[in-house]
Image (cartoon, rainbow, N blue to C red):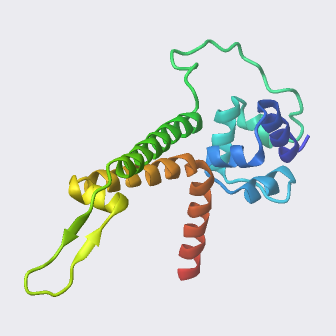
Amino acid sequence: MTFGEKLQLLRKSKGWTQEQLAAQIGISRQALSKWESDTAMPDTENVVRLSRLFAVSTDYLLLDDYDTQPPQSPQVPSPGSNRPSAHLIRLIAGGAASGLSVVILLVLGVLSSIYPCVYSISPAGVEWTRVYTGLSGFLKTHHLEWFFWLWCAVLVGGVCVMVYDRLWPKLRQLWQMIRSERK
């Protein structure tokens, strides 16, 4: 069995997609696809990462004549083994932050329609008057602009945390491509 066949077997035994495995070891899905099709081989660092991730020896991964199933050592549950994955934690935290911020922003919008406010500014020596109504008038009257923008930032941050696992490998790949072009 080749390296690619073994890698594909191990990945599927965990129920992971190529994208999920690639994100866990910090490479692109295309690189993983090349490894699984035996058109490229990973560097030593990535072979070690894979062997640790799947709890198999590097010999099992690299040697074609080492076809036996990877040894299944009895797993003694470690104190933190039942913890959710980092991906799940990021999804929950990002979803909670985004959801809370949407609720708070909606409450501000509803309050501004229940208690309509008009806020006007007429600077001295100027013949014009600036009038704020609706949500902006409500926020200015009650001095809540900072609160509104804080929850807008929390919303953006929550969304970024939720898409981190999909976005980070692509940004990292783009950064490496830009760095290689400069050299």
Going 90% across and 37% down the picture, which residue do you hit? 65
The part of the image, by quadrant, that contains residue 50 is top right
Q: Is residue 182 above or below residue 105?
A: below
In the image, 78 versus 94, the foreground residue is 94
Going 28% across and 57% down the picture, which residue do you hit? 117
Q: Is residue 32 left or right of residue 145?
A: right
Q: Is residue 134 left or right of residue 160?
A: left
- Could you tell me how many numbered marks the image carries? 0
Q: Where is residue 119 in the image (x, y as percent from the top left)?
A: 23, 64
Q: Where is residue 2 in the image (x, y as percent from the top left)?
A: 88, 44
In the image, 95 versus 16, the foreground residue is 95
Going 83% across and 50% down the picture, which residue do you hit? 36
Asked whether residue 121 appears in the rendered view, the answer is yes
Q: Position of residue 120 (x, y in %)?
A: 21, 69
In the image, 84 versus 94, the foreground residue is 94
Asked whether residue 183 appears in the rendered view, the answer is no
